[in-house]
Image: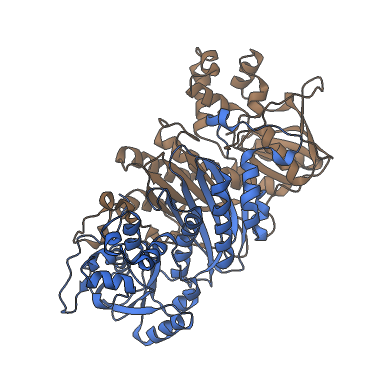
Chain colours: A brown, B blue
Amino acid sequence: MASPLRRDDGSAAVTQDQRQISGEDSLIARYFKPLATDPGALGLVDDAAILRSLGEDIIVTTDAVVEGVHYLAGDPPETIARKALRVNLSDLAAKGAVPAGFVLTLALRSTEDAWLSPFADALGEDARTFGCPLLGGDTVSTPGPQMISITAFGRVPHGRMVGRTGARPGDRILVTGTIGDAALGLDVLTGGAVAAALASDPHAREMLVSRYRVPQPRNVLAQAVRNHATAAMDVSDGLAGDLTKLCAASGVSAAVDVASVPLSAAAASLVARNAVCVETLLAGGDDYEVLCTVPPAQCGALIAAGQAVGIGVTAIGTIVEGGERPRFLDGQGKELALKRLSYSHF
Amino acid sequence: MASPLRRDDGSAAVTQDQRQISGEDSLIARYFKPLATDPGALGLVDDAAILRSLGEDIIVTTDAVVEGVHYLAGDPPETIARKALRVNLSDLAAKGAVPAGFVLTLALRSTEDAWLSPFADALGEDARTFGCPLLGGDTVSTPGPQMISITAFGRVPHGRMVGRTGARPGDRILVTGTIGDAALGLDVLTGGAVAAALASDPHAREMLVSRYRVPQPRNVLAQAVRNHATAAMDVSDGLAGDLTKLCAASGVSAAVDVASVPLSAAAASLVARNAVCVETLLAGGDDYEVLCTVPPAQCGALIAAGQAVGIGVTAIGTIVEGGERPRFLDGQGKELALKRLSYSHF
């Protein structure tokens, strides 16, 4: 897209080869065309892409990551790329959708090959791994922090997207993987209390940092979620806050057994040593696990589906009637007083 | 989406009303939920939206605007909103697609009502005018310049999107509206030579500024473009550069009669007075007109379709064989030496 505002910086030499008329086009051709493997991407030579539908619903989700907000300025380009795509894939997983592709808006300060090349390679690797090809995008210059905005598409049979509004009293609350690791990983990266508590455990530090930098979206469970969940969302802002949103959307409340919330060995050890309180994990954010509600008779099937692919699926509580916010109960049935539920930008 | 990175700024008070759990959610509910009129938007309570298709192709386009790059920091929020959506609608128009909706990523430094309220109102007004409802989005905080990234969706009958690759020798080159006004408007806003040349003509200044700030996408002509054009794109980076891209994609060249390029009265007067050279208009960018190639027998029909809705459609040249870049010829058939073809970000 044009902007004469930076016309001096942006002037492009007119060469004899009309296929190289601007730096922007060269950049797209060099780094991103190899990722545009879907015929609907039209090889990135058009302003638009084509998403074919044969009557299924197209699920659309969009999430942006901003340097210094969602990732650290010094994070490796590979992990930034993976995080930008995976936070969107995580939404598709929770909606029960099969990835269909994505468009990318990349706001860059500079175009160093040393950054762009590993960024594009990692993005392409994830696009292949998750079956979610690049369909198009926009590359713009910015004087400010880098930002990567992705809109991802998925497919579900018509009417089968798993929403937030279907949770019913009696449903069990299930969550994939482990909760709170990413928040701990960020604390490690920023030299917080966790970094100190794990000074002698580089493996634990590395695992937690990896959970912050590279989410593990649960797309392999999308079909099982679609088959069994009455409501679902991904845990991105913090389990406590996200469950609160799900309950509000469904017009129900919930009781969570905090001792059941699945923790990694590293997180459990930190809690046991009082280096971290469990509330921090419940409100931490960046988990990118699936949170869903499932009728009791179907919990076993979803847990088994997880076992089949090596992903833990854990029941952590029950949906109950009422309009109050979910209660988080300790081993004695006493409610935890959560000072905050989740991250909010504003 | 979460980010514990700014956890102190982002902490949200836990109220008894679980429907107000975070500032981000309140912001979305207050300003953007009224725009989410499509059932597929799910009232913005979900992370995802549903785009229904009954066998048509879904056309996807994405364009971002960055403060200080695509618009001026002091531009009114109303015009920023309209520009952000319209640059995407313009792509849909050129592809022959009927708007179906859009998702919005808003990177904000602050959340002042005095900015957000007119921004959302104008965005909603345009969404209604163009039949392109808000389907979803992401609101993130940024320490840097504001950025608005929009991904817009359109529908065309299967296989009927107008691409860039179909131009054939003998096709006439047609363009809607007038070319170069937006570049002149930017020059007025930044106090350049145009501002001085138009010191005594406030109406012309205002018209040109409006063309820069608020594009007029030609969506009412989308069906006519689909019915008659062999190739099309919107003119966003500059007519010369965009035609060069279209020709490269189609494997053809072109001869443009520069005297035929439609100019507004203000632009024509500036050229006649030698206050601006025509090359500046040809490479200016931000026009958001439709550039298309049409077999000679069908030019009349497209021009008539324009007349019926009050939009000029002008033949400016002919597609010819060859791989060299398009030639821009003056009244004597002499080729203009264009120093630059268009804006490029890098």
Observer-nearest residue: A217 or B186?
B186
Quadrant location of residue A63?
top right
Q: Position of residue B238 (x, y in %)?
A: 31, 63
Quadrant location of residue A309?
top right
Observer-nearest residue: B269 or A234?
B269
Note whether residue A212 is visible: yes
Residue pictured at 51% horizontal, 59% vertical: B152
- Vertical position of residue A275 compared to residue A99: above or below: above
How many discs appear? 0
Observer-nearest residue: A237 or A143?
A143
Observer-nearest residue: A96 or B346?
B346
Q: Position of residue B316 (x, y in %)?
A: 30, 77
View extreme (front): residue: B200
Note whether residue A49 is visible: no
- Vertical position of residue A287 compared to residue B194: above or below: above
Q: Position of residue A187 (x, y in %)?
A: 53, 23
- Vertical position of residue B30 compared to residue A300: above or below: below
Q: Position of residue A338 (x, y in %)?
A: 71, 26
Q: In the rendered view of the protein, which quadrant contains the N terminus of chain B?
A: top right
Relative horizontal placement of residue B116, taking residue A45 as reference (left or right): right
Relative horizontal placement of residue A74, taking residue B56 as reference (left or right): left
Residue pictured at 65% horizontal, 61% vertical: B38
